[in-house]
Amino acid sequence: MLRQCVLCPRNCRVDRRAGERGFCGAPADPVVASAGPHFGEEPCLVGRGGSGTIFLAGCNLRCVFCQNFDISHAIVGEAMGPPQVARLMLALESRGCENINFVTPTHVAPALAEAIVLARGRGLRVPVVWNCGGYESVEVLRGLEGLVEIYMPDFKFACRESADRYCGAPDYPERAREALREMHRQVGDLRVEDGVARRGLLVRHLVMPGGLAETRQVLEFLASLSLRTRVNVMGQYRLAGLVLRPEGGRGWAAIARRPTPDEVAEARRLAIGLGLRLAE
């Protein structure tokens, strides 16, 4: 899949094994931008020891408003092969982390899958979290079955127009729905024991300014997937990335403000009204 890269729906078909770069800009092996216990994730991921986050450089979405713009739109950090990533995973577990949380892993899935196998063989016991943007290949997800305990995708956009405008992926809504169905098939609803997530699907949805109509569509899909779907309706959108640049005003004026408290509150009321379970 790397020789004619089809790891995500962009299907760039570049030979990443030969050093070619596609939309994500990443080499075949992961570039780790940072790693360590993270206490700012959802409480069920943090527990007592924190979530063992491994931030990967590059991204297959590269949203114009990305709050991790410095590492998603550039390749910065330490290149690591699967054995090095496996050692990092075991080191995070030894520090008391409740899980291993791969942040933006889609574009380096083969190397991470190998790292998971190596780490499990060396005694890793905590769950693996696949913390992704939702723009996934179902074929790749099927290859991860049995390796990932917790899927934590974003579901960003319900409309092709928004997805095209903000991340150049007009097929995002369809691909995200397919991906979430596959994730749910593999791991089911989120299971939490003693306050800590052990297995299942946890979805994030960022409330966008003026975006309540799309939020409703996203939440309605999640309710159709399962009324026990755990969703974090997030209100922390802020101006970041390309939206901050002067030239950004042309196409992104609609998101050049933060969502109002009323918009965030209404989004959460929508989720509760549909019977969904909030994770915050």
Image: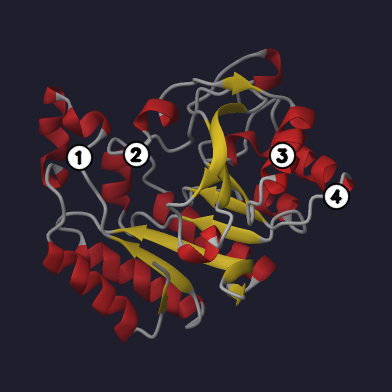
Of the residues under marks 3 and 4, which one precedes in the sequence?
3
- Front label number (3 vs 4): 3
Q: Is residue 42 visible?
A: yes
Q: Are marks 3 and 4 in contact (CB under 8 Å)?
A: no
Q: Residue furthest right?
A: 121
- The quarter of the picture where residue 119 lies is top right
Disc 3 and disc 4: Cα gap in Å?
11 Å
| Numbered tag placed on residue 167 in the rendering | 2
At 87% from the left and 44% from the top, the residue drawn is 122
Q: In what quadrant of the picture does the N terminus appear? A: top right
Disc 4 and disc 2: Cα gap in Å?
39 Å
Disc 2 and disc 1: Cα gap in Å?
15 Å
- The one nearer the camera, 59 or 262, is 262
Q: Which residue is mark 4?
A: 123
Q: With 255 as the anchor, is 183 left or right in this view?
A: right
| Numbered tag placed on residue 91 in the rendering | 3
x and y, in percent, of residue 206 in the image: 32, 56
Disc 1 and disc 4: Cα gap in Å?
42 Å
- Front label number (1 vs 4): 4
Q: Which residue is mark 1?
A: 239
x and y, in percent, of residue 72 in the image: 43, 31
State whether residue 219 is above or below residue 34: below
At 63% from the left and 34% from the top, the residue drawn is 108
Q: With 275 as the anchor, is 152 left or right in this view?
A: right
Q: Are marks 1 and 4 in contact (CB under 8 Å)?
A: no
- Front label number (1 vs 3): 3
Of the residues under marks 2 and 1, which one precedes in the sequence?
2
